[in-house]
Image (cartoon, rainbow, N blue to C red):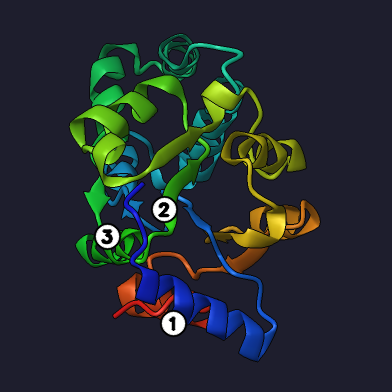
Amino acid sequence: MRGCAPACGRRLACFVRRTGVPMIRAVLLDADGVVQSSPKFLAMVAEFVPEERRPEFIQAIFDAERPCLTGDADFRDTLATVLADWKLESFHEAFMRVFHDIQIDQGVLRQVENIRKLGVMCCLASNQQSYRAKHMSVVLGYKRLFDREFYSHLIRVAKPDTQYFRSILGSLALPASQVLFIDDSMPNVLAASNAGLQSEHFPSNSGSQHLGALLRQHGLQVA
């Protein structure tokens, strides 16, 4: 983590004394819906599945992914089972690729940089299966853009389980009140709150300006 300039530290301390808001030492951002989106997934589903059966197919994919989010199954295998049930086994690699077709919100990434310039840690906190997490970390470069990455398949527990957040707090060695969590899923936000974190709901893909406003509410004076 980059060192905080003395003037920045004084400003944060003054803010805390003036407002009573806990000083934020780390920000946790969800990935999908906050930092990134996957606009081509639904188009891929539409290409292969009749309209009236699409909700059923999407639910089957999500159900297959669920044990993979906690490292209890391999997504290649569970996806293959679903596609075989739907007679789409020949499109296995195409479906694997579409999960890696991710659009990054560059404005949000600039806010990540702004957070780190304040001397505050900025970490990714995301439910992900191993293949997608590796793509995000290595190919998209999140391992250098964020101070830490907290992927559910490595923690072995997924949001909204409060143990997910307790595990992160243990790794950061920070009081819960000094950690801000931002997610587009309200159940995840409520779970973080129950674990003692400062938490904010972020309407899905609402962009960098909205993110900046939330950060400023917690004393982080970003652009």
Marker disc for residue 113: 3
The residue nearer to you, when weighing 11 against 49, is 11
Q: Position of residue 1 (x, y in %)?
A: 36, 46
Q: Is residue 206 visible?
A: no
Looking at the image, residue 27 sits to the left or right of residue 171; the answer is: left
| Badge 1 element | helix
Q: Residue at x 63, y 90 (%)?
A: 18
The residue nearer to you, when weighing 194 against 120, is 120
Relative to 189, say whether 130 is above or below: above
- Going from N to C along the chain, the mark reached first, 1 or 2, is 2
Q: Residue at x 39, y 74 (%)?
A: 8
State the image quarter where residue 135 is shown: top left
Quadrant (top left/top right/bottom left/bottom right) for the C terminus: bottom left
Relative to 66, say whether 83 is above or below: above
- Going from N to C along the chain, the mark reached first, 2 or 3, is 3
Q: Are marks 2 and 3 in contact (CB under 8 Å)?
A: no
Looking at the image, residue 23 sits to the left or right of residue 144; the answer is: right
Q: Position of residue 106 (x, y in %)?
A: 20, 61
Q: Residue at x 30, y 32 (%)?
A: 137
Marker disc for residue 96: none
Mark 3 burial class by Cα count in 10 Å: few <14, some 14-19, many 20+:
some
Measured Cα–Cα span from mark 2 to mark 3: 8 Å
Q: Are marks 1 and 2 in contact (CB under 8 Å)?
A: no
Q: Position of residue 119 (x, y in %)?
A: 38, 60
Label 1 or label 3, whichever lies nearer to me, is 3
Q: Position of residue 6 (x, y in %)?
A: 38, 69
Q: Tell me the amino acid under the disc marked 2.
A: Cys
| Badge 2 element | strand
Marker disc for residue 122: 2
- Going from N to C along the chain, the mark reached first, 1 or 3, is 3
